[in-house]
Amino acid sequence: MDPLVSILIPAYNAERWIADTLRSALGQTWRRTEILLLDDGSSDRTLAVADTFGSKRVRVATQPNQGAAATRNTLFSLCQGDFVQWLDADDLLAPDKIARQVGAAARSGDARTLLSGTWGRFVYRPGRARFLPTPLWSDLSPVEWLIRKMGQNRHMQTATWLVSRQLTEAAGPWNPRLLVDDDGEYFCRVLLESAGVQFVPEAAVFYRASGPASLSYVGRSHRKLDAQFHSMRLHIGYLRSLEDSERTRAACIRYLQDWLGAFHPERPDIVGEVTRLARELGGRVTAPPFSWKYAWIDALAGPGLAKRAQVFARRTKAAAVRSLDRTLWRLENVGFN
């Protein structure tokens, strides 16, 4: 078994990180790879930096801005691989990530097996990435994987997967309507077509946490809130198509409850839809209470101001953590040089 693996990189305004990402792709110990990078109309020097890596192994192209999902669809239409490795433009692969999963695929012998691996979150220093196991880090059937994902509010990072071409074609294209959670919805469809997930613990991915700049950040954007709820409804439909039982409905209700805080109180229309959907599933959801730090604001000025204060505090803390990590990263680089 000597399959070709296509490493597909959608890139938008990733000038600071794209060189490291490409080096991690080129550094794979599995040498049968093609690397395709598609710049989605960046306004910075992403394309110029990527062009310096252009070679027989690295193909670089550009297009007017169309969004991440449409860019991924174009990339797949251009690739020739027997397997697909999706890689965001600021994340990194461990050198043996693909080799480990190709080996597992060979031992499985089933092109419908979906390969996953470990992932650790970092900001500037990948050596400080924290790999925190979750209930999804296991061999699981599609229905068990979705029950754990939705019922326990878990996720897998996009680059952890290695997907056969057969599974990729069966799942269909990425959904350009989804401004957020397009990866969550997409891999639900991959799961539905799969024979199950095989977890490869040695296959590691380094996920850069970029905060509000991340495409996955929802915040208070009404368009992103609409997209998030649309993805949630699709998730529920996918799980129930596999098994419509008391336990799957319970996982769906828990999923709705966990996300209700994202919509309350700014979007009463979505809150109403979430409440109605929970009733249809045989349960109920309640508005999440604020912690003691913000409950007094809620009592005095209402939930809208309390939530804004909560979000501001979290973003301020995260920005401080990123700033400290950036400073330490720079000091380490000065010391190294």
Image (spheres, grey):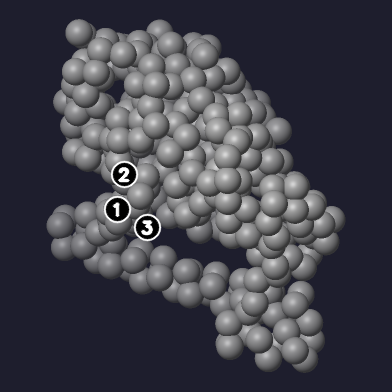
- The answer for how far apart the CA atoms under marks 3 and 2 are is 22 Å
Residue 133's disc is 1
Quick check: marks 3 and 1 in contact, CB under 8 Å?
Answer: no
Q: Residue at x 24, y 34 (%)?
A: 200
Could you tell me the amino acid type at mark 1?
Answer: Pro
Please state the horizontal and vertical placement of residue 13, each as a whole percent of the image: 53, 41
Quarter of the image with the N terminus in it:
top left
Please state which of residues 130 and 188 is positioned toward the viewer in this rendering: 188
Please state which of residues 153 and 208 is positioned toward the viewer in this rendering: 153
Could you tell me the amino acid type at mark 3?
Answer: Val
Pointer 1 local density, CA inside 10 Å: few below 14, some 14–19, many at least 20: few
Image position of 133 (left or right of 334): right
| Label 2 element class | loop
Where residue 162 sits, quadrant-wise, is top left
Q: Residue at x 25, y 12 (%)?
A: 109
Image position of 303 (left or right of 191): right
Please state which of residues 62 and 138 is positioned toward the viewer in this rendering: 138
| Label 3 element class | loop
Residue 123's disc is 3
Q: Residue at x 68, y 91 (%)?
A: 296
Where residue 245 sits, quadrant-wise, is top right
Residue labelled with disc 2: 137
Quick check: marks 2 and 1 in contact, CB under 8 Å?
Answer: yes
Could you tell me the amino acid type at mark 2?
Answer: Trp
